[in-house]
Image: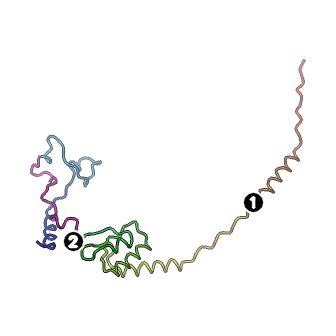
Amino acid sequence: MSVKEKLELRKAIKSKKPKYLREDHHKKKAVNKKSWRGPRGLHSKMRHGFQGHRATLEVGYGSPKEVKHLHKSGLLPVLVCNITDLSALDKTKHIAVISGTVGARKKVELVKKAKELNVSVLNIQDCDAYLKKSMKNWQKRRLQKKRPPRPKKPRRKRKKRKQKRKKKKQLKPLKIPRKNKQKN
């Protein structure tokens, strides 16, 4: 069997695969519908596989070994973070996936390099359209008027303040303590 035939077989197998939902997800709000956990109850109908109850995980729904983890195009997706990762790819076997942590400037560089090397990028549909759009955005940012700089506040002079404090202390009249009169 060729890779194309195995990809079609995988598609057919996955179309028959049921959605695995957690037991009693409809009864309890806290139980997430899609977080699969195997049923462990002693009298669980789902665990016993009774008719009319939800399906549990089975081996038969797995993909063929040769096409496991492959994209539907038959290429293996590889996460790319920089240009060295991109240049190491083989365009006949791999398809690039640009990491979400990569910034806009580096992403543009990666797309240009991928275009040069003829490596397809999975999370960008049209490289030319993406490059045009990013260049337009950069030009818009450049044309926007920059805010005028804020006027600087004059710095306070500490020496003058200290001198004023000294003068105030000198001007204050001295307090003379009064003697208490003794009562006879």
Q: Position of residue 154 (x, y in %)?
A: 73, 64
Q: Position of residue 147 (x, y in %)?
A: 60, 73
Q: Position of residue 92 (x, y in %)?
A: 24, 76
Q: Nearer the viewer, residue 156 or 74?
A: 74
Would you identify the image quadrant in which residue 158 lies?
A: bottom right
**Would residue 97 be counted in the magenta stretch?**
no
Callout 1: SS: loop
Q: Nearer the viewer, residue 119 or 60?
A: 119
Looking at the rendered image, the disc whose residue lies closer to the viewer, 1 or 2, is: 2
Coloring scheme used: rainbow
Q: Are marks 1 and 2 in contact (CB under 8 Å)?
A: no
Identified at 43% across, 70% down, the residue is 103
Identified at 32% across, 67% down, the residue is 79
**Overall secondary structure of the magenta section:** loop
Q: Which residues are magenta?
A: 48-75
- Above or below 67: residue 132: below
Q: Which residue is mark 1?
A: 156
Q: Is residue 97 left or right of residue 49?
A: right
Q: Is residue 183 left or right of residue 83?
A: right
**Would residue 70 be counted in the magenta stretch?**
yes
Callout 2: SS: loop
Q: Which residue is mark 2?
A: 72
Q: Nearer the viewer, residue 40 or 184?
A: 40
Identified at 28% across, 75% down, the residue is 90
Give the tally of numbered discs: 2
- At label 1, the amino acid type is Arg
Q: Earlier in the sequence, mark 1 or mark 2?
A: 2
Image quadrant for the C terminus?
A: top right
- Above or below 49: residue 19: below
Image quadrant for the N terminus?
A: bottom left
Q: CA distance from mark 1 to mark 2?
A: 69 Å
Q: Is residue 25 left or right of residue 154?
A: left
